[in-house]
Amino acid sequence: MIKPSVLLFALLISAPAWYRLLFDQLDLVQVLIRFLIAVPIAAVLLAGVRFIFAGYRKTDEEPVNLVTPEPYDNTEPGKSP
């Protein structure tokens, strides 16, 4: 399934073609072809951004590193200080 963010980004990429459609400089078929070409390009670019930022995401599944305090014994057994 295509995410809405991909479609919005593809619409943004193909915005100049949609603008030229308003002034009858391009046909609707050409604009739709440019939009369809922009969809996989937008999907790849956004997947790259998601991959880069995935390492910075915090999850609740990370184990908490609990350290139990223990007394420090500086003397070796059998020797007096």
Image (tube, rainbow, N blue to C red):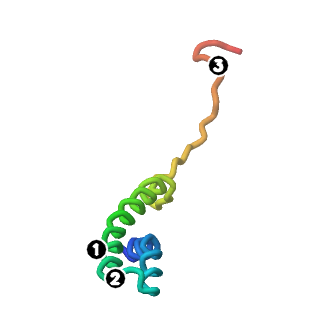
Considering only order in the chain, which callout, 1 or 3, is on the residue closer to the N terminus? Answer: 1
Residue type, label 3: Thr
Q: CA distance from mark 1 to mark 2?
A: 28 Å
Residue labelled with disc 3: 75
Residue labelled with disc 2: 27
Q: CA distance from mark 3 to mark 1?
A: 66 Å
Along the viewing direction, whichever of 81 and 13 lies nearer the viewer:
13
Q: Position of residue 37 (x, y in %)?
A: 32, 68
Query: Would you call the spot at circle 3 few (<14 residues within 10 Å), some (14-19), or many (20 or more)?
Result: few
Considering only order in the chain, which callout, 2 or 1, is on the residue closer to the N terminus? Answer: 1
What residue occupies the far top of the structure in this picture? 79
Relative to 39, does residue 24 appear above or below in the rendering? Answer: below
What residue occupies the far right of the structure in this picture? 81
Along the viewing direction, whichever of 1 and 45 lies nearer the viewer:
45
Q: Quadrant of the N terminus?
A: bottom left
The quadrant where residue 32 appears: bottom left
